[in-house]
Image (cartoon, coloured by chain):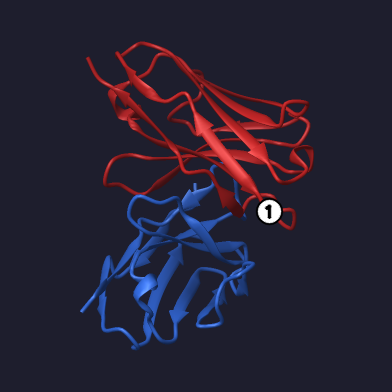
Amino acid sequence: EVQLVESGGGLVKPGGSLRLSCAASGFSFISYNMHWVRQAPGKGLEWVSSIRRTSTNIYYADSVKGRFTISRDNAKNSLYLQMNSLRAEDTAVYYCARGSLLSDYDLDYWGQGTLVTVSS
Amino acid sequence: EIVMTQSPATLSVSPGERATLSCRASQSVRSNLAWYHQKPGQAPRLLIYGASTRATGIPARFSGSGSGTEFTLTISSLQSEDFAVYYCQQYNNWPPLTFGGGTKVEIK
């Protein structure tokens, strides 16, 4: 069974940092592109970042470029999101998601999300 | 950036009725479009990819159509578990991947 389990969310002050993790199981992690998508309270879905299978290509939304860093450890079946210089508008549930094998960028499995709250 | 626009924002439907949701792209995304639904407190779930192919385990009452800039998700006979928010997403021109604002399907 495919499982994606996020952790690392919490309350952080503006300007602070947080590192999210996503533990993957039930599939060959190295075979898939991985993604972070967030959802502000009561709002829609916003793509944050993507990383290809061997980390050769990485992409960010303009809203997080220069502040967030996506990475993965294929030996540990884990995806990460280092978030620095956090702002109130980064408050959201952060989901990790797997890109499908067929197209890479439709998201066929999602974790349950971890809540990040940026507030003083 | 490709902007995805969904309509209506809210759709009120009785159980057993048909629901038709629309998604429009600001420029052609060919057939590189996915649909998801999200129930309260849950993660999104992939329903349709490639504009018209049902994802694994998705019932046949869900169907997708369209290409280019105009897309439709049809739920032929709404079940109680189908009341949720539905999002479309394009993956033709990226980054960024972009989602529509969502359509909430509620019980009439």
Rendered shade, chain A = red
Question: Disc 1 designates what residue?
Answer: A100
x, y percent for residue A36: 53, 37
x, y percent for residue A90: 36, 28
**Count of marks overlaid on the render:** 1
Taking A113 as reference, is B66 above or below it? below
Camera-side residue of A73 and A55: A73
Can the viewer see residue B37 in this picture?
yes
x, y percent for residue B96: 54, 42
In the picture, which chain is blue? B
Q: Residue at x 22, y 14 (%)?
A: A120
Chain designation of label 1 = A
Taking A80 as reference, is A34 above or below it? below
Would you say B40 lies left or right of B53 here?
Answer: left
Identity, as a three-letter code, of the amino acid under mark 1? Ser
Camera-side residue of B91 and A113: A113
Q: Quadrant of residue B87?
A: bottom left
Q: Residue at x 43, y 68 (%)?
A: B23
